Image (cartoon, rainbow, N blue to C red):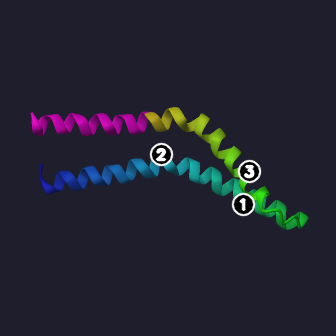
Amino acid sequence: MTGEMIIAVAERAVWVILMTAGPLLVVALVTGLAVSIFQATTQIQEQTLAFVPKIVAVLVAIVFFGPWMLSKVTAYAEDIFGNLSRYIG
């Protein structure tokens, strides 16, 4: 394996991580923003109100985006193992 190949694999790994975590982070961000606006307008300062909706929203997003995320990670793993077998055996 050359240095360029290792860098390309690492670069693709970072890209796959960003692509799979991105939708969940956006859902958590939007939900947190909505809850914060709700808390500011109603002047409710309950700490657990910030966490429970985010947890529920992220769980729903995992159900929705899960198959797509799994296919991205699986394709990356197959690519890694396919390239590894060419260089080892």
Q: Residue at x 38, y 34 (%)?
A: 74
Q: Residue at x 11, y 38 (%)?
A: 88
Vertical comparison of 53 with 76: above or below: below
Q: Residue furthest left?
A: 89
Vertical comparison of 42 with 66: above or below: below
What's the residue type where badge 1 is placed? Leu
* 78 within the magenta span: yes
Marks 1/2: CA distance? 21 Å
Q: Is residue 65 left or right of residue 81?
A: right
User: Any mark on residue 18, and which?
Assistant: none
Residue denoted by label 2: 20
Q: Is residue 18 left or right of residue 23?
A: left
Marks 3/2: CA distance? 22 Å
Quarter of the rendering containing residue 61: top right
For the stretch drawn in magenta, what is the main secondary structure? helix
In this view, the residue in front, 47 or 42, is: 47
Give the position of the C terminus as an image quadrant.
Answer: top left
Residue denoted by label 1: 33
